[in-house]
Image (spheres, coloured by chain):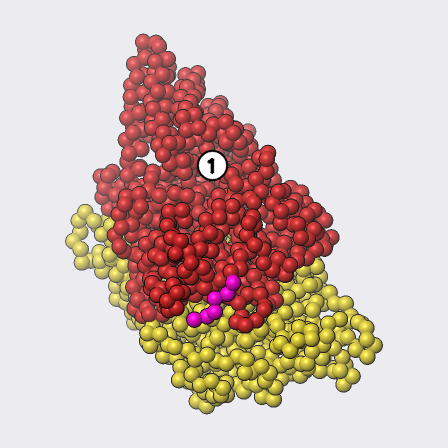
Chain colours: A red, B yellow
Amino acid sequence: MANITKKVSWSSRADESGAAGEGTPLLNGSEQPRHSRQPSEGGSLCQIGRLSTVDLEEEITSDEESQRGRPKEIPHNEKLLSLKYESLDYDNIENQLFLEEERKMSYMGFRCLEISRWVVCGLIGFLTGLIACFIDIVVEQLAGIKYQVVKENIEKFTEVGGLSISLLLWAVLNSAIVMLGAIIVAFFEPIAAGSGIPQIKCYLNGIKIPRVVRLKEGPMIHSGAVVAAGVSQGRSTSLKRDFKIFEYFRRDTEKRDFVSAGAAAGVSAAFGAPVGGVLFSLEEGASFWNQMLTWRIFFASMISTFTLNFFLSIYHNKPGELSNPGLINFGRFQGDSVAYNLYEIPLFIAMGAIGGLLGALFNVLNYWLTIFRIRYVHRPCLQVMEAMLVAAVTATVSFTMIYFSNDCQPLGPEHTEEYPLQLFCADGEYNSMATAFFNTPERSVRSLFHNQPGTYNPLTLGLFTLTYFFLACWTYGLAVSAGVFIPSLLIGAAWGRLCGILLATITPDGSVSVIWADPGKYALIGAAAQLGGIVRMTLSLTVIMVEATGNVTYGLPIMLVLMTAKIVGDYFVEGLYDIHIKLQSVPFLHWEAPATSHWLTAREVMSSPVTCLNRIEKVGTIVDTLSNTSTNHNGFPVVVKVSGSDEPPKLCGLILRSQLIVLLKHKVFVELARSRLTQRKLQLKDFRDAYPRFPPIQSIHVSQDERECMMDLTEFMNATPYTVPQETSLPRVFKLFRALGLRHLVVVDDENRVVGLVTRKDLARYHLGKHGLEELQLAQT
Amino acid sequence: MANITKKVSWSSRADESGAAGEGTPLLNGSEQPRHSRQPSEGGSLCQIGRLSTVDLEEEITSDEESQRGRPKEIPHNEKLLSLKYESLDYDNIENQLFLEEERKMSYMGFRCLEISRWVVCGLIGFLTGLIACFIDIVVEQLAGIKYQVVKENIEKFTEVGGLSISLLLWAVLNSAIVMLGAIIVAFFEPIAAGSGIPQIKCYLNGIKIPRVVRLKEGPMIHSGAVVAAGVSQGRSTSLKRDFKIFEYFRRDTEKRDFVSAGAAAGVSAAFGAPVGGVLFSLEEGASFWNQMLTWRIFFASMISTFTLNFFLSIYHNKPGELSNPGLINFGRFQGDSVAYNLYEIPLFIAMGAIGGLLGALFNVLNYWLTIFRIRYVHRPCLQVMEAMLVAAVTATVSFTMIYFSNDCQPLGPEHTEEYPLQLFCADGEYNSMATAFFNTPERSVRSLFHNQPGTYNPLTLGLFTLTYFFLACWTYGLAVSAGVFIPSLLIGAAWGRLCGILLATITPDGSVSVIWADPGKYALIGAAAQLGGIVRMTLSLTVIMVEATGNVTYGLPIMLVLMTAKIVGDYFVEGLYDIHIKLQSVPFLHWEAPATSHWLTAREVMSSPVTCLNRIEKVGTIVDTLSNTSTNHNGFPVVVKVSGSDEPPKLCGLILRSQLIVLLKHKVFVELARSRLTQRKLQLKDFRDAYPRFPPIQSIHVSQDERECMMDLTEFMNATPYTVPQETSLPRVFKLFRALGLRHLVVVDDENRVVGLVTRKDLARYHLGKHGLEELQLAQT
């Protein structure tokens, strides 16, 4: 076998924990002088923390570390980049084992794999649809019971007097339900908090959020992703079952694809929007557009909507009626009364601007609230109490609003209201404010969209918007599984309808009255504007709205509104999901490198020096490297020394921590004493069985004798990692990294020697702030 | 300056014309022995032409050449890969000039660029919409005149007798119009033939189809792309105008993005399907999904539909009515009668299968026809005559069908028919066959979708399907600008309606009669099935159909139908566009490398040896290299020798033929005699002005003195080209190449020395045939 070279170990800050390089010998340190950079004119605009230190040469590492790692005073979280998040590997690890397996596989084998991918996607769609159906029925039943009980109670006490008891009942009921949810979330699964969309967004971006796709409850998009992760792996760690199927799919690449499909299926089930679901997955997740993958995602979405519709049609005793849309049904917009005209376009755009403003306000308020929560409300019991408080306050405010409202409307013959509250209205009339508050939000949206003109008076709508706005803002980010979609739509629909009514009032009744007459149209536009202003999605949201309303005609106005809302909103603050991602210091990679980053090169961006391993390495060294808690690396370039030459070793591969762990666990050692290879033959299966939760190095016992053995990494390393020269500009490095979904990118010099390693954190660090290019600090939070 | 090393030139077959390596000295040839490959078990399934020769070592190159290059007998075109097509460069050429410009640009500069991108996209959408509007009105007017004249003539001669004169009139009118179009196409712009979709598909894939985006007439998708290419460059070579704006966009990367937007705007205008347009562009073109780009594409689509609707509403005297769909208006599907039920799903799937079968038949027939045309109908005058013949035959067949049809229908009070032909029908009745034939295809589709049940009798529909099928098949590929979309829809709608009628007949009248009663629903499904069976698009086509019919409900059935049609059709033959792309021997890159290609590595795939240039190179050498017509390379690795060492030179950059041409043209020489640098300073502007039609090397005069000068390439070469090691597997190389839209990928050894070059042709060569992996031959056709 090849000669066994002296161990070469370069310390690194690739995935470091602050103080890198301690105690490890620095070899070839002088081979990689940090070239002093000449900041160009363009660069003068930018303020980067490292600029001042970058011209110093030798002492740079320790200087930087003290400046960068673990700062004493934690600044605002959004200026930090947490080191606790690992990346996913969307690049296939093409080692010899993998290539052998692929080469052994026949054409039919690949066909079968392809078919099983479709089957898995079908299953994902089916199960997601089923879950959606289950959630829908349970929510409907629970809400039905709740509102029925409260309604009866209110009716009882309206005559007798003493409505405070009804209020109490409502508040207690609300709090009790919320408490249940909050306890589960706060104590058992903190990751289930919120809508799950930021988490899925991060996962699809390539960040390993711990437990993000573990089995648990959650809103639809998240549910879809969880189902996908479970089904595609053919096992569930939470349920401790392994069905021994789909073992081929046990790697990040395949799993990500299925999770995309699951998320799409979730959106599809939630809004009855299969195309919107696909676009959501693509907009939020995918980097490399793959036609076959997109079709599979579309298939999962379609099956999901279909399953939901099928089972709901049975539940509603109309079996086979498949034309219904999804879970959140806004009702169809049909007929000529809802057609729009050219002169309404400016009005729509103005509403989009309002939506952008209100959305920005919402986001800013929620941002402050979240900062407050991070600082002071981080204990589980406090979180539960806050959630209960919000529930009680919501009930109280709603009740108060209903109580003081004098907006009585005649109870129409169609009886569209589920729980009409009479209160102090005359017989045959009901309280219109109660329609908005005393109802599931989804129904409220529908009634705002479709009820006849005149159902609401402007004051009711205004008050409702105001109170609901602040309540929703307070609610988002609580330790419960709750999204922002429906509340945003509701707020927007309310003020949108208000706009419609006001517009109809201020214009003289004339030729245009037919078109003005429908405030539902404006409610739709308002809902789109508000939601767009908060979450800042455009393409997928347009399609979702179009599909959920069942009307293609509104495509253009909705798009214009969403774009306006985004432009106006972006002027002030980022989208809600992005804010929350930033606040968690997640190393999120955007679509492109910051525009003004062309003057940065791989040399400045990379982490260096790097801990490298020899192709045939001493077991003791490997164990020590992995055990080094100060440098918690996950990938190691493998180098080889040219035999009989003094030259520094050259790059020959890349190996992951997880692979080394499996090798150590299976004791794949070469005993030098016997001078022959007794290395145990490992299979890909051994790696797949350990995926995705590889044991920590501490759990693996290696004896002193074994430490003296050697390990041959040739078979297991990825022999052809992607590399870039040191002079490569940041945008170019970024593009390669992002387009291929890499985890480690090796930076080499002219002689193919390792000089650095680029990881996700090195790239995510740079972002475009208000004052040009800014650099985030890395922290161990 | 750096020492000037001896010229190193390796001959190459990168973009060769058969006999490579002639006369060029082979340096370092022995440095790159072709390693004998061990075909694994997986490989035994595959049959690759080179297998037999690949184990020979030294003589391999010449052996291969004689076997591969310019074969005596030209096999079927689809087994060839033409060398005449060049690739586009979607990777930014990051040379010093480019980086300097980017670094100089301020944040505001990038903002302005971004805004101008949006402005350009808006313009593209607006102009495409305007063109669509113009086409619509002209076609309507022309068809109106034609049908009016023929109708009056027929009515005159029906009573008198002598309808043969009417037939003659119709045939002559048809032929005359077609002749005009065919002459323009055949003699002036051969690329305008067909629907333009295959061409745009190739362009977006990264293949330079000569003159594909030059100013000329063409169907909508193509028109959009042409508009985009014109507007985004701020000039038109055809019109010889340069507005000196948007100079930044004068490179392949930016132009491609705008052409994507144009294609989407075209689809959007044609079908009133903005989302469908975006998906079309993505499905057919993009590789790297970029959110901002997608939004811009969506914006262009939206503006396009909007413009079209706005101007058409004025034209139709209903100004401001914007709810109309696009150019090809299938009419809305509304009301309960068109709802579908669970038990109809299997029927839809069966219709999808029929569509797949008929589509495959269509494609096979058209394939044979195209082969015939390539062999025998390649002279322009023959092409014009064939087009006229088809026009005349179409008129004759249509007339005969109408003449012998006895399907008289009462003329309803709604008077939905534009040109009702009475012929031998009783007064107050009209010939139903004439509705299908004697009408623009678009109107025929609409009447098949929406006319009352009973409008057509089954025999009429059957005969119509049969004749129209063969006529459409004959028409596609003629030397006229005509697509396959509408004819396919028409054929499908006809047999779909037939299916609906038959289904209604064989089931007893009972509870289900309401749903069976609408054959229009089946016409829609049939249309989708037929179109899907022919073109094999799924995602974008589903969305286009949904948007064009204005009904979201049919999403799932249409998708199921399209998927079935694709699966069934793919079993027999490829999609029509792919067939035509293959017949033109275009090096088209699919989404992924063939599944069973893991046993091929860069070493086997790459072209080698490669012609390299020194960083400081003699002008004479450069001129000779570029002038070498036998090796018509477009990209050259630049190498540098380590000073005072015997080692072979190392890779330091990559330069394109087009850049060298500009350098030569501007005489950017260093005169060694004066021993100082007098190299003229070139700007990026000089390269942009020459883009995209760089002069040939023959047009540049270099004197004998100048030949002795040197040229310093340092500033102009891309200093950080992407590289891969020799052992990289084909799928890995493919992924890198495809995801980043590369044109040249340098293969290096452990020491960073150039050993080969991978170009588009090297990758497109491998494809999965019926019997496993197959290799296409390269030819100079």
Mark 1 surroundings within 10 Å by alpha-carbon count, few (fewer than 14), some (14 through 19), many (20 or more)? many
Report the amino acid beneath label 1: Ala
Which residue is under mark 1? Answer: A527
Left or right of residue A428, residue A487 in this image:
right
Q: Is residue A133 visible?
A: yes
Question: x and y percent of residue B383 in the render?
Answer: 48, 80
Left or right of residue B297, residue A312 in this image:
left
Question: Is B542 in front, or is A730?
Answer: A730
- Up/down of B169 relative to A601, above or below: below
Q: The N terminus of chain B appears in which quarter of the rendering?
A: bottom right
Question: Is B304 in front, or is A402?
Answer: A402
Q: Chain of mark 1?
A: A
Residue at image coords 31%, 37%: A136
Main SS of the magenta part reads: loop
Question: x and y percent of residue A57 in the render?
Answer: 68, 53
Q: Is residue B216 visible?
A: no
Residue at image coords 48%, 75%: B603
Residue A342 position by quadrant: top right
Q: Residue furthest left?
A: B508
Residue at image coords 46%, 79%: B35
Q: Residue furthest bottom?
A: B72
- Number of dots carrying numbers: 1
Question: Is A513 in front, or is B675?
Answer: B675
Residue A3, magenta (yes or no): yes
Residue B540, magenta (yes or no): no
Question: x and y percent of residue B340 in the render?
Answer: 28, 50
- Element on which disc 1 rests: helix
The span shown in magenta is A1-6
Residue at image coords 43%, 65%: A714
Q: Residue furthest right?
A: B674
Question: x and y percent of residue B572 in the render?
Answer: 31, 72
